[in-house]
Structures are given as C-alpha cells and as structure tokens.
Image (cartoon, grey):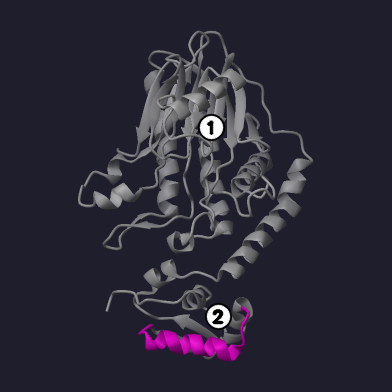
Amino acid sequence: MTDTPELTDRQREFIAHLPAPTSEIADRMGVEPTTVQDYRESLRSKGVDLEYDRDSNTWYLTDDRAPKLRRISTKHKGTKTREANELIEAEESVLLRRLRATDPLTTPPRESPDAESFVAVLSDLHFGDLVEDDRGNVVYDVETARECVRAFAEKSLAIRALESEYTTFDDAHLFLLGDIVTGEGIYEGQVHDLEAFLADQVTESVEALYELAVTLAEAFETLHIHCVLGNHGQVRASGVSRQANCDLIAYRWLDDALRRDDVENVSLEIAEATHHLNTEIRGWRFHARHGQDGQRHVDKTAASSRDWRGWREAHRYDVALRGHFHNPSLDWVLNRYPVFTAPSPKPGSSYIERLGSPDVNDRKHLGWLFGVGDSRPVTFKRLIDNRP
C-alpha cells in the first residue's frame, strides 16, 4: 500500500511531533496523555505503522510511507501560531534589537568612469515550500531552492566573464525582492505545502544567500545588497507590525553573518518601513518593490498605467524592479523607463499541468542580470535559467 490515508488535522499534528514520548506529545498538543493514546490507535486503524522504543520511552513512525506522511503532517493552527510568534519574539529580542543598535553595513561604491556596475536580481525563492508533481515526485524543496541560488551565483560569474570581453566591472549590486521565505499562514491550507517551518526557512535561506553574497563580494570590488520585504514573510495579523516579517529576519541575519566574518567590501540596506526601496547606481535612480500592491501587468491596462506612471511621478525612477508574480518580463513605462519583473524558481501549477515535458524544469528561470553604465541605465540584460 503506497497511498497515504485521509488524516484529520489532529492526526497529522500527532505525526508532526514524532518521534517523542507520549507525555511530550500531550504537552505539545495541549491534551491529556489518554487522548494521545486515542490518536495513536486511530492512526493504527488507518494502517499507519507506529512503534515504541522502551529504552528511550519514545514512539516513532516505521511506516514505509513515512516521508510522505511527514510532508502532509501539520500542527494545530493554535500551536503553529504560538510557535511562529515565539520565533519572531525571540528573534526580535535578540538579533533584531542588537542589529538595530549598530551602524548600517556600508562600503563606498567604486564606480570608475571607464567601468560598469553589475546588477543581479533575485525574488520569490520561497524557502520551505514543497512542490510535488501528480506522481508524488518532489520537484521543489529546500535543497532545490539552495541549488537554484548556487546556480544563479555560477551563472552570474559566467555572464560577468562573458561581458568582460566588452567592458570592465567594478561594483556589483544584488537586489532581493522578497518572499525569500514562504511563511506558514499566508493562505488556507498552506501548511500542507510546506517542507520546513519558519525557523528552518530562515536558516536555510540565510545560508544560501550568504554563499551568494560572499561569491559576489570576492568577484567584484564592492557588493551592495538592496532588500525589500515580501508578503509571504508576514507572520502576524496585518496591521500589527511590518517588522513581524521573516524576510526581515533573514536579511538582518545575513547582515549579521557578513559582519561576523568581516566581509568588508559589502553594504546592505533594507526597506523596513515601506513596501519599496529607492537607491542610486552610477547616478541612475532605481526603484525596487515586491509588487503585491500592484497589478500583474505593467503600463498595459488603465489600472497598471495608473500605478506605474504614478510611481514614476512619485519616485522619479530610471529603472524599476519587482517580484511577486513569479513570471519574468521586461516592460517599459511611457516607452522609456524599464521595469524588470523577476521570476521565481519555484514551479507553479502550470508545471504540473505540463508534466511529461522533459525540459520544463531545466528551463526554470532564476533571475535577471544586467549592467549599468554612466551613460545608460541598462547596458546589457540576461534572463538566467538553470540549464547547463
């Protein structure tokens, strides 16, 4: 028997806490030990194999479907909300407050007149998401997300070497446009789509971004990281605090890691109080936002024209960047100002519909790379995928 049985929320929560003693499971679930025994027997009645180790007083899962059962397991909404808040409160009380008291991580740009700046754009990595095709094969998970970031780093260096035949580069700029982590309660039933919960989402994403940052810092004279928050990083009710966002924790933790290892040629800025960030590269004004507060199209409908022409008037950008919509595009506002929409390496529903096409995953887009010169805001552009 390979199919997984239909489980109740509490049965899935029980599995999520294994391996553990009965008393510990009862405490985590907020029930009596006798109730835990009832959950255990109800799972056995559905054909789920459980065993007990007397030496360690621990119940554990021995079912040959254990990996799939663990992926669909979850915790009670109240338990998950409490644990999410405890994580954020702990991070805010230790990491966020400590970094808030420090000066920004800065380094001056080089920007030699005969050189260009190298720009890399990543968004919507969704660390923690688990995507399976209709045969149960995993097509996106934490390790896939890490591999996508590594591939993006490798492609960045390859494009830098290719373009160096025509120009030289001094500075690099890395834009992180949000939804780096995938969160937990963004939509109904999201817990069934997760491989990792908040703490692990943050840990895994920071490790991957740290490797990318160090790679770019070693390849260029300076690296400047620009960060905006996504909607999936939110972990509390809307309107409570923009700082209750796990993207912010990931960015602050990245800042902390770079300081700890004395990576001196890096600056890092985060848009904490707004949905957008404005910065300058070689005298050109760049406007970055996650994009959840705008239309899918850019300057193609009445609503999108109102948005993007309004933002052009408000922010006076020369180039704009956004994520959120997962599909890459390059559009022009007023036929003059480019807007890069960053892709997501995470497969969407169309991926499953197209199951059977052997090259779908090989052509998954990762991000944008482009150059910025003194006389032109975009000197070249490359949409990067993860093909060899």
Q: CA distance from mark 1 to mark 2?
A: 42 Å
The quadrant holding residue 78 is bottom right
Kindly identify the residue that appears in the image at 67 percent across and 26 percent down.
Answer: 107
Say which amino acid is labelled 1. Phe
Question: Which residue is situated farthest in the right direction here?
Answer: 101
- Residue at screen point 50% across, 73% down: 16
Q: Is residue 160 above or below residue 203?
A: above
For image coordinates 27% across by 79% down, the residue present is 1
* In front of the other: 99 or 220: 99
Q: On screen, 303 above or below 208? A: above
Place of residue 350 in the rendered image (x, y in percent of width and height, measured from the top left): 30, 47
Front-lying residue, 182 or 113: 182
User: Mostly what secondary structure, the magenta segment?
Assistant: helix
- Name the foreground residue: 196 vs 7: 7
Q: Quadrant of the C terminus?
A: top left
- 189 left or right of 288 in image: left
- Using the image, tell me which numbered label, if any, was put on residue 367: none
The disc, 1 or 2, on the residue closer to the chain's N-terminal end is: 2
Check residue 175 in the rendering and tell me which mark sits there, or answer none: 1
| 10 Å crowding of disc 1: few (<14), some (14-19), many (20+) | many
Q: Which residue is mark 2?
A: 20
- Look at the picture and state if 187 lies above or below 82: above
SS under mark 2: loop
| Vertical relation: 369 (above or below) 82 | above
Q: Does 305 lie within the magenta span?
A: no
